[in-house]
Image (cartoon, helix red, strand yellow):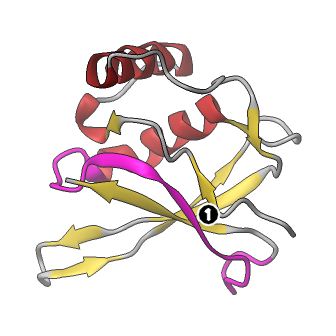
Amino acid sequence: MNYPQELLRDIYWSFANGKFSSKKRFLKELKSYYKEISGNEIPLDLEKVIYPYPKMVIQYMKYNYANEDWDEPQVLLRSDKEKGFTAGELLYKIHDTIGKHLATEDNCYFEGLTFGTDQDPDYPNTAVYFLDTGT
């Protein structure tokens, strides 16, 4: 497969922004947050398919205070439609599933996705992306 090497690089978002009752509310807050941080409108069409596959795995870093080391959990995301993920759907699903684990961490800022592999034995024929976060 020819997977994109990077996704959503120019999007500003903080996982500390809380939980949202719907994708619509999330997208409204995302646009508002982006405008507040950058002074500009968000630079992409959130309804456009940016990842033309129906599933992907997101791997992220989470500090484990119990053993004082970093964990690298993985989450399988599935698109609502076979055609793949729109930018808005992907950001919403990342926030909804992973955001709660990063909301109180130093690395709570979204900085994009980087392709890792499509050879993960736990998820055959599925691309694994690393969630890039910042402080």
- Residue 43 position by quadrant: top right
The residue positioned 60% from the left and 29% from the top of the image is 88
Q: Is residue 64 left or right of residue 83?
A: left
Q: Position of residue 119 (x, y in %)?
A: 72, 84
Q: Position of residue 15 (x, y in %)?
A: 31, 40
Which amino acid, mark 1?
Val
Q: Position of residue 47 (x, y in %)?
A: 70, 23
Q: Helix or strand or loop: what does disc 1 sit on?
A: strand
Confirm whether the magenta stretch covers residue 110: yes
Q: How many marks?
A: 1
Which sits in the foreground, 52 or 41? 41
Confirm whether the magenta stretch covers residue 35: no
Above or below: residue 110 compared with residue 125:
above
Above or below: residue 30 compared with residue 90:
above
The residue positioned 60% from the left and 40% from the top of the image is 90
Q: Residue furthest front?
A: 39
What quarter of the picture does the N terminus occupy?
bottom right
Q: Is residue 57 left or right of residue 20?
A: right
The residue positioned 84% from the left and 66% from the top of the image is 2
Q: Position of residue 130 (x, y in %)?
A: 50, 66
Q: Identify the residue under disc 1.
A: 57
* Span shown in magenta: 102-124
